[in-house]
Image (spheres, rainbow, N blue to C red):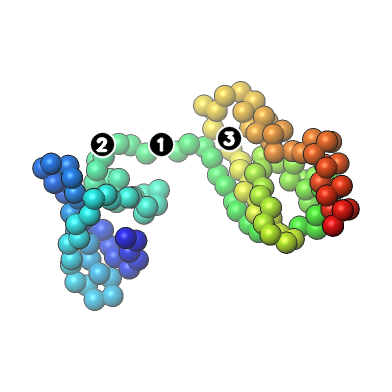
């Protein structure tokens, strides 16, 4: 079950580890409720109150990564100025149906990343000449 509009207050795991009881406040009315389930998934962000409660001594450490996401118009031209520029950046991009793509641009690669890791990832995301030719042939055939 996924719930929106609740503020996590606390949780406790049953003695037999078979269930978890969550206490939360209903934000609209301020009522405090308890829910029991088999599993609690902490999907409340990087400053998770659930994680802080479950692992109180765990110190967060900045990984050094930053990411921006956006959807852009995609002409289908593999050699467009946009895609050429995108390939020069540390970037992951995914085509969506029709003429759009999602771009996730990363920066500030953490110093603990293996040397050359981000260059290898960018190279893997860049289509080879054979892949570009196959894509062009597929577009021409349509």
Instruction: Quarter of the image for the C terminus: give it.
Output: bottom right
Q: In this figure, which residue is indicated by the disc labeled 2?
A: 57
Residue at the outermost top position: 115
From the viewer's perspective, is residue 48 above or below residue 28? above
Q: Which residue is mark 1?
A: 61
Q: Position of residue 23 (x, y in %)?
A: 19, 59
Label located before the other in sequence (3 or 1):
1
Place of residue 87 in the rendered image (x, y in percent of width and height, measured from the top left): 74, 41
45 sits to left or right of 85: left
Q: Earlier in the sequence, mark 3 or mark 2?
A: 2
Specify the farthest residue to the bottom. 29
The picture places residue 99, in percent across and down from the top left corner, at 74, 61
Indicate the quadrant where residue 61 lies: top left
Q: In this rendering, does residue 132 appear at all?
A: yes
The secondary structure type at the circle numbered 2 is loop
Q: Is residue 103 left or right of residue 67?
A: right
Residue 26 location (% of width, % of height) = 25, 69
Residue position for label 3? 109
In the displayed image of the protein, which residue is found farthest to the left? 15
Mark 3–mark 1 Cα distance, whole angstroms, equals 14 Å
- 111 displayed left or right of 83: left
**Residue at 70% over, 38% down:** 125
Nearest the viewer among 45 and 121 is: 121
Q: Dot 1, how many residues are within 10 Å of its Cα: few (below 14), some (14-19), or many (20+)? A: few
- Residue displayed at 78% across by 51% down: 82
């Amino acid at each position: 079950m996924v719930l929106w509009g609740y503020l996590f207050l606390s949780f406790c795991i049953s003695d037999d580890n078979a269930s978890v009881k969550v206490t939360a406040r209903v934000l609209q009315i301020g009522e405090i409720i308890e829910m029991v389930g088999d599993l609690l998934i902490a999907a409340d962000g990087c400053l998770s109150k659930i994680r802080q409660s479950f692992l109180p001594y765990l110190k967060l450490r900045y990984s050094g990564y930053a990411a921006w996401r956006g959807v852009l118009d995609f002409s289908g031209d593999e050699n467009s100025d946009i895609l050429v520029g995108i390939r020069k950046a540390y970037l992951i991009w995914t085509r969506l149906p029709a003429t759009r793509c999602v771009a996730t641009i990363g920066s500030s690669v953490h110093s603990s990343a293996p040397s050359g890791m981000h260059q290898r990832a960018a190279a893997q995301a860049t289509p080879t000449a054979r892949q570009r030719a196959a894509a062009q042939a597929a577009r021409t055939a349509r």
